[in-house]
């Protein structure tokens, strides 16, 4: 069973930063690529970034150069450092097992964490 818990969201002004965390159970995390997704009000969920167990990463064009995904294998945790935030980054952010091309590999989603960027 996939178990992922997102945290770290909040309210920030445009240009600010936030760091999100995705804590996974050992079986979920071990050896699996993990991705971040987001869903803005009235929009479909979209892929943001993926990191594989060896550390290689891939990003959506909309966040490239502003967001950084990383993982701590000892803590079974994946992070998303978000810098230079824009109002259009406002969304609920989720993590999941993910392919490098952004396809979610599990149909099980957590509660997500809300990120709100004010202008």
Image (tube, rainbow, N blue to C red):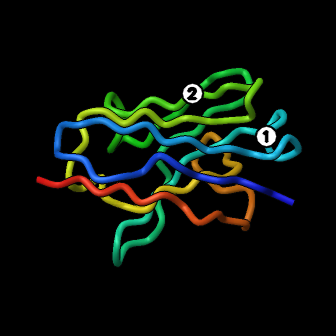
The x, y position of residue 16, in whole percent, is 23, 37
> In percent of the image, x 74 and y 45: which residue is there?
24
Q: Earlier in the sequence, mark 1 or mark 2?
A: 1
Q: Secondary structure at mark 1?
A: helix
Q: Is residue 74 above or below residue 87?
A: above
Work out whether residue 79 or residue 67 is closer to the camera in this orientation and state it.
79
Where is residue 88? Give x, y as percent.
24, 56
- Which is more toward the observer, 61 or 51? 51
Tag 2 residue:
70
> Is 67 on the left-hand or right-hand side of 71?
left
Residue 105 in the image: x percent, y percent?
Answer: 73, 56
> Would you name the residue on which mark 1 appears?
29
Residue drawn at point x = 87 percent, y = 60 percent: 1
- Say which element carries label 2: strand
For the residues marked 1 and 2, what is the alpha-carbon distance in whole angstroms?
A: 13 Å
Judge from the rendering whether residue 20 lies leftward or rightward of residue 104; answer left or right: left
The tag on residue 106 is: none
Residue 34 rendering spot, x and y as whole percentages: 67, 42
Q: Residues within 10 Å of mark 2 (few under 14, many from 20)?
A: many
């Amino acid at each position: 069973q996939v178990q992922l818990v997102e945290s770290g969201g909040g309210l920030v002004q445009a240009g600010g930063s936030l760091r999100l965390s995705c804590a996974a159970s050992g079986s979920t995390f071990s050896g699996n690529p993990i991705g971040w997704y987001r869903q803005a009000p009235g929009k479909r969920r979209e892929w943001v970034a993926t990191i594989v167990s060896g550390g290689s990463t891939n990003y959506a064009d909309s966040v490239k150069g502003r967001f950084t995904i990383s993982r701590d294998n000892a803590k079974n945790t994946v992070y998303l450092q978000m810098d230079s935030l824009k109002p259009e980054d406002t969304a609920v952010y989720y993590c999941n097992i993910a392919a490098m091309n952004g396809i979610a590999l599990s149909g099980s989603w957590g509660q997500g964490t809300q990120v709100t960027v004010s202008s």
